Amino acid sequence: MTETSLLQYAYRPNGPYPSTPLTTKLVIQKPGMQDITDSYAVEGQFWKDDGELDWELRRFWYFAWGEMMGYYQNERLRGTR
């Protein structure tokens, strides 16, 4: 039995350790801009240009990604990384 099969067996709905789905505050699939303020984690492939995700949400992600890259470059130039 693989680990995945064992976990699926142990945590099946009528098994000894029934699992419960995560709330939408923890994981969002195909999120929208309205989910940014209500969620703890947002899941999506924001770098893909396939039209599946809202452009405003992708734009928000690109700005956040740019801030992180800018911070990393600044730390690298200062010699702390």
Image (cartoon, helix red, strand yellow):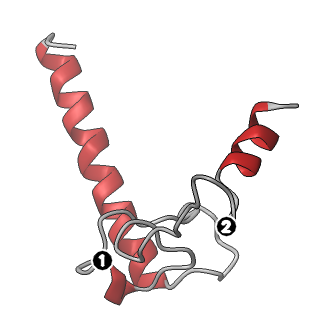
Task: Residue 31: give x, y in percent of width and height.
Answer: 48, 80
**Disc number placed over residue 36 in the picture, else none:** 1
Q: Is residue 15 above or below residue 13?
A: above
Q: Marks 1 and 2, Cα distance to the nearest angstrom?
A: 31 Å
Q: Quadrant of residue 37?
A: bottom left
Rendering quarter of residue 62: bottom left
**Callout 2: helix, strand or loop?**
loop
Dot label at residue 14? none
Query: Is residue 63 found left or right of 24 in the rendered image?
Result: left
Judge depth for marks 1 and 2 and give the one in front.
Answer: 2
The answer to which of 71 and 5 lies nearer the viewer is: 5
| Residue 22 horizontal/vertical position (percent) | 46, 68
Pointer 2: what residue? 13
Residue 77 % position (x, y): 18, 19
* Residue 72 lies in quadrant: top left
Q: Is residue 21 left or right of residue 2?
A: left
Q: Residue furthest right?
A: 1
Residue at 74% x, 50% y is 8
| Mark 1: amino acid | Ile
